[in-house]
Image (cartoon, grey):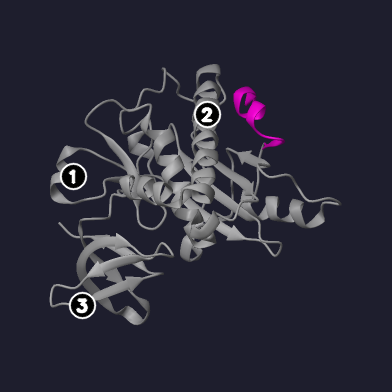
Amino acid sequence: MELTRTSELLPRVIWQESSSSTNAELRELARAAAAPLPDGTMLVTSDQTAGRGRLDRGWVTIPGQSLAVSVLLRHDAGELGVSWMPLLVGSAMSAALQRPFGAGLRVGVKWPNDVHVRDEADAIAGRPGLKLCGILCELLPDGAVIAGTGINFLIPEEELPTGRATSLLAAGADVNGATNLFEPAGSELVDTILWDYVTELRELLELAATRPGVARARVARHSLTLGTEVRVHLAGDETVDGRASALADDGALVVERPTGGVLTVSAGDVEHLR
């Protein structure tokens, strides 16, 4: 697949016909390289067969309909720190995926790192909508981060893997008539989305380093979780209900308990309550 515009932004874009895991493959390339791989090295496939998502969940892609993308980032997010990387990546991807949608649909992040699209009914009910993209960031020994994303582009509604998932096509985005990522319209769609994503991510990382308050505000603006009633599933089958009110200094979710006090959630599944 030709990714002409994206390749103009980045030092190296590697297209793989198939990959067991783009994160694992990019990690191995970084480990084995004689010199450090440059910031922005990207590995892309439409056929990921054994990828790993958050909490070790499976993460595969459907050839011609979805995409796995991993990018090597040699930024430290400034004073925000590496814990903000998944939030910054999610914010950048939300902005990129918002553009093909018209009014009435909002793309944003369900904390900590799932990109969803929701309609007005979802917003009124406090629901996050349906998942368009998953994110998994991994820290390398040298301090670099691999940001892995899995994007559902052209999966028809009847072929979606779960009832909680959607795709650009199924959710009604303007895909310029594309039905397969390998046809000209599909390749152009991919190139445009990835160019937008990289451009947004670079800007956010620069803001994180120079104007962290602005970066935090942009991440909060893209959050679908802040301000909603949630149920946090913690280790040991413990659950806590409350209102997601803020992001802590390390990007953790601050949940106000209805009986008073707050819970700061660094890890765990968050369910939006209707």
> Of discs 3 and 2, which sits in the foreground?
3
Q: Residues within 10 Å of mark 3 (few under 14, many from 20)?
A: few
Across and down, in percent, residue 31 comes to 77, 57
Q: Are the residues at dot 1 and dot 3 in contact (C-beta closer than 8 Å)?
A: no
Q: Quadrant of residue 100?
A: top left
Task: Give amino acid for label 3.
Answer: Gly
Cα distance in 3D space between marks 3 and 2: 45 Å
Task: Give amino acid for label 2.
Answer: Val
**Which residue lies under the disc numbered 3?**
261
**Which residue lies under the disc numbered 1?**
123
Q: Is residue 100 left or right of residue 77?
A: left
Cα distance in 3D space between marks 1 and 3: 26 Å
**Which residue lies under the disc numbered 2?**
190
In this picture, is 203 found above or below 139? above
Q: Dot 3: what SS? A: loop
In this picture, is 134 found above or below 261? above
Q: Is residue 92 visible?
A: yes
* For marks 3 and 2 on the same chain, the one whose residue lies earlier in the sequence: 2
Range drawn in magenta? 1-16
154 in magenta: no
Q: Is residue 21 visible?
A: no
Cα distance in 3D space between marks 2 and 1: 28 Å
Across and down, in percent, residue 6 comes to 61, 29
Q: Residues within 10 Å of mark 2 (few under 14, many from 20)?
A: many
Q: Nearer the viewer, residue 122 or 155?
A: 122
In this picture, is 159 found above or below 90? above
Task: Give amino acid for label 1.
Answer: Ala
